[in-house]
Amino acid sequence: MRPQPDKPIVVRGRILGGPAPLLCVSLTGRTRETILREASHVSKIAPDMIELRVDFWDFAEETESALSIIREVRRIVGDIPLTLTCRRQEEGGWGKVSEEGKFTLFARGVDAGLVDFLDVELAYGEEKIRGMLSDLGTVSLIVSSHDFENTPSQDEIFSILTAEIQAGAQIAKFAAMPRFEEDVLALLSATLAARRAYPQIPLITMSMGEMGGMSRIAGGFFGSDLTFAMGSNSSAPGQIPASVMKEFLSSLYPLQ
């Protein structure tokens, strides 16, 4: 049995922290038409979660237009949980979105009951992150950190996950680009150490690129509770097609 958190998060019938890692697919379209086409395609794959990557949207700062798209995606995908993400350019984001525009959309999406998870980068700091918690209601907060250049040491990765949890993360997330095979092992070892040190918090970790692909498949055995796969387009280097990933997960984690 894989190491699971003591308090999994149950959303729309999916268990984040259950017997198997959940499968998430990101929507990375830029226009209304491509986003909705992606949503229709991905809903047929039936992942456990869909991530809306607002930083790809041409109209990300137009709050009403963005909310309209989120409503349409919700209608198309039904009860598949939605994560709202607007990635900073410094951590792999596509376009630059102002902090005000980003957090206004986050607040409106939460108030409208359209999303189930928010992803906020640790770089915004504990004060900003904790200030959001009281307004989230039933929405769960992912606090994340990404390094697209290198992989820190095992101890440094553990410290980043610790900082996310101390900042108020209900789910802690870390992703990094490996340069050597040992980097993948460092990430998996840090994940397992964090799972043991913080047994109540679901974790999401991955090593990116081709070299890190194994972590996306087998990370669940080290305490990672969700993996990303490619729908219509990839949102990060090394993602495996969702249909293939579903087969891997069903074979490796048959209790799900």
Image: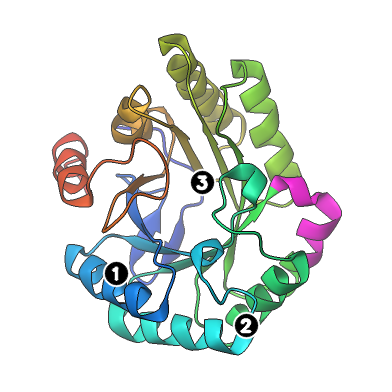
Residue 227 sits in quarter: top left
Query: Can residue 247 be seen from the camera position used here?
Result: yes
Q: Dot 2 lies on which element? A: loop
- Residue identifier under label 3: 202
Q: Which residues are magenta?
A: 122-131
The residues bearing labels 3 and 1 have C-alpha atoms spaced at a distance of 28 Å
Looking at the image, which residue is at 63% across and 26% down?
158
Coordinates of residue 162 in the picture (x, y in percent): 69, 34
- Residue identifier under label 1: 38
Residue 166 is covered by the magenta coloring: no
Q: Is 46 positioned to the left or the right of 225 in the image?
A: left
Give yes or no for contact between labels 3 and 1 (Cβ–Cβ under 8 Å): no
* Residue nearest the viewer, comparing 172 with 101: 101
Q: Amino acid at mark 3?
A: Pro
- Residue identifier under label 2: 62
Coordinates of residue 164 in the picture (x, y in percent): 69, 43
Residue 130 sits in quarter: bottom right
Which circle, 3 or 1, is nearer the viewer?
Answer: 1
Residue 141 sits in quarter: bottom right
Q: Is 232 positioned to the left or the right of 129 in the image?
A: left
Q: Dot 3 lies on which element? A: loop
Which circle, 3 or 2, is nearer the viewer?
Answer: 2
Lower position in the chain sequence, tag 2 or tag 1: 1
